[in-house]
Image (cartoon, rainbow, N blue to C red):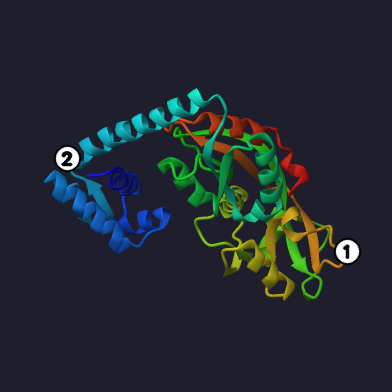
Amino acid sequence: MNLMQIEYFIEVAKIGSFSRAAITLGISQPMLSRHIRSLEVSLRYTLFHRNGRGVELTPAGTILLDKGMELLGSVKNIEMALEEIRGAPEGRVTIGLPTRISQAVTTHLVKDFQKHFPRATISIAEGSSNLLHEWLLVGKVEIALLFDPPYSSDLELEPIMSEELYLVGSKKANIKQAKRVSFSELNKFPIIMPRIPNATRTVIMAAAAKAGVSLNISIEVDTIHNILELIGSSMGFGIVPLSATLKEHKNTPYIFSKIHSPAVKSHLYLATSRHHKHTVLASQMRRMLSSINLNKLV
C-alpha cells in the first residue's frame, strides 16, 4: 500500500466511477483498476461493489476512505510545517482556470506570481468549470476559478466577477437580429450551446425554465472557440459574454443583441476546498488572486 494508491482509491470513492475517476486523474482506466486491485490484494479486502451505475464502497472501503483522508491530511500538515520553518513561501501551487478565460488570464497571473513568489513554482491546470470543481474536491488543484458552481458545502466560494450574456449572431446571417431581444424571443433563433454538463449552459437553461421558454438548441459543441467559429459561418447563434468574442476587434464578424426580461449573467468565483489543508503559498496565492481585477483582463 502506498500514498498514490490511497489517492486513487479516494478519487474513485468520491466520484463513484472508475471511468470518470480515470479521466480526472489523467490516467487510463485499466491502469487505475490495476492500482485499486493491488491495494485490495495488499489489504486482503474488497473495497468496492460494482453495479450498473458505477461502484459503491464496501464496509471495508468506507473505513479506508475515512482513514485514508486522515492520512493524506496528515501528510499535508507535515508539508506545511516544513514550509513554515523555511520562513518564506516556497514549493508548488496548482491553480485551475476555466478554458474560456485562461488565455486572457494566464500571462498576467504568472507574471504576478513570479514577482511575489520568486522561489516558488506555479502549475496551471485548464479545463471546464465542472472538471475543475471535481479536481478541487480531490485535491488535484488547490485553487480554482469557477463559473457558476453549484452550491456545495465542500467549497469556500468568493464571487469575483460577473458578465452579462448576449445573443451573438453573424453579420452574414439572414435572420434579423435587433440590438435588444427579450428572453422569450430567443426561441426564434437556432442556438449553439456546449454539451451538458457546462456551467454557462446550466445558467441559461435555468433562466429558460423560469421564463417558460423552450430554446431551439440546434448544435452542441464544447469549446467557445468552436462555437464562435460556427456562429461566424452562419451556422447558428450563441449566448455568450462579450469578452469571449474579442469585441475590441474592429472587423468583428458578429452582431450582439442585449438580452432582457430577464437579463442573464455568468458569475465567476474564486474557489478552494474546505477539506484540504492549504499551504502558506496557497493561502497567499488565494489572497493575490482575490485582489486581481479580472474585468480588465477578460
Label 1 CA crowd tier, 10 Å (few <14, some 14–19, many 20+): few
**Mark 1 is on which residue type?**
Lys
The kind of secondary structure element at disc 2 is helix
Percent x, y of residue 59: 17, 39
The residue wearing badge 2 is: 60
Q: Nearer the viewer, residue 120 or 131?
A: 120
Percent x, y of residue 3: 30, 42
Q: Earlier in the sequence, mark 2 or mark 1?
A: 2
Percent x, y of residue 159: 63, 35
Mark number for residue 36?
A: none
The residue wearing badge 1 is: 250
Quarter of the image for the N terminus: give it.
top left
Q: Name the residue furthest left.
A: 44
Q: Nearer the viewer, residue 180 or 6?
A: 6
- Give the Cα separation between the discs numbered 2 and 1: 63 Å
Whether residue 283 sits left or right of residue 245 in the image: it is left
Percent x, y of residue 36: 24, 52
Q: Is residue 141 above or below residue 175?
A: above
Inspect this view and state whether residue 2 appears. yes
Inspect this view and state whether residue 148 appears. no
Whether residue 277 sits left or right of residue 168 in the image: it is left
Q: Is residue 55 above or below residue 245?
A: above
**Mark 2 is on which residue type?**
Ala
